[in-house]
Image (cartoon, grey):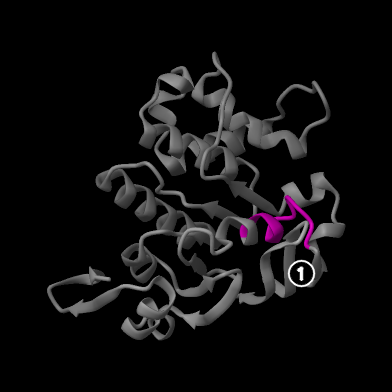
Amino acid sequence: MLQIDGVSFAIGKHRILDDVNVSVRAGETYGVIGPNGAGKTTLLRVAAALVPPSEGRVLLEGTDIHRLSERARARRVAFLSQHPQVGFGFRAREVVTMGRYAYRRRLAPLSEADRAAVDDAMESTGTTAFADRIATELSGGELRRVFLARALAQQPRLLFLDEPTAHLDVRYQIELLQLIRHIQEECGLTVVMALHDLTWALRYCHSVAALSGGRVVASGDTDSVLTEERVEEVFGVSNRIVHSDSGPPRVDIIGV
């Protein structure tokens, strides 16, 4: 589905990504992990063609994603940033409808297909109940689901999520990640998401890439990458990875 070949990204003399190679299989949830400043957000932005790489290329189903028109790309790829913004006065349904821009002519009315896509996205994310509420009056968890619905309204095949659980309390983090898993399985989406919490990566990602200093330290199936030795190498902390018959796996941070 997605092939990142020899991608580097620099601002002036500051190299943020350095010869990154990543392969994402169709239909999987792929996690990007690493400490602050490792280059996670930059990698997602380059891979989603929001910024061009300094070197290398990104192939989406064999096509250089940076050569696609914005409209063609938006019909295949959606990106949900860590800090999505919405103007004042928009209702939740209006925000979700913004996801249909790639399918509509400027100022054209909504088609039946547009309305159906918006309805499906809101139903999938559990946002129909507050469709008429002002978006800025929603809770953080509700608003994050509205932005997810907006991304799904694009009907993408590949969904990028940059720290989707950022600034949410634990309950909403779990609800959102379970929702993403359900949507991914039901729709056959390929999901690539940057995650700060290693336990969430262990539980919700089929594969991961561990970044450090803009380079890939390791990539592959989650269990093979997220080991106690590698967590200590990448994050500089002593840890214990717990697999239990009585509950899901977790990463316990013991100390530095």
Q: Which residues are magenta?
A: 44-53
Q: Say which residue appears at 41% left-offset and 59% top-offset.
A: 196
Q: Say which residue appears at 70% left-offset and 74% top-offset.
A: 3
Q: Is residue 245 above or below residue 40?
A: below
Q: Which residue is mark 1?
A: 59
Q: Position of residue 221 (x, y in %)?
A: 46, 81
In reply to whether residue 46 is colored magenta, the answer given is yes
Which is more toward the observer, 180 or 84? 84
Tally the numbered discs: 1
- Residue 84 lies left or right of residue 133; in this view the side is right
Residue 189: tell me if it is visible. no
In reply to whether residue 122 is colored magenta, the answer given is no
Among the 4 quarters of the image, the one containing residue 144: top left
Which is more toward the observer, 149 or 240? 240
Q: Position of residue 35 (x, y in %)?
A: 45, 64
Among the 4 quarters of the image, the one containing residue 195: bottom left
Tell me which secondary structure the magenta stretch mostly adopts. loop
Q: Residue furthest front?
A: 13
Graded by Cα atoms within 10 Å as few (under 14), some (14 to 19) or many (20 or more), the crowding at tag 1 reads some
Asked which secondary structure carries label 1, the reply is strand
Residue 135: tell me if it is visible. yes
Classify the position of the N terminus by image quarter: bottom right
- Residue 133 lies left or right of residue 191; in this view the side is left
Q: Say which residue appears at 53% left-offset and 25% top-offset.
A: 93
Please state which amino acid type lies under the numbered disc 1: Leu
Which is more toward the observer, 157 or 59? 59
Q: Say which residue appears at 55% left-offset and 69% top-offset.
A: 27
Classify the position of the C terminus by image quarter: bottom left
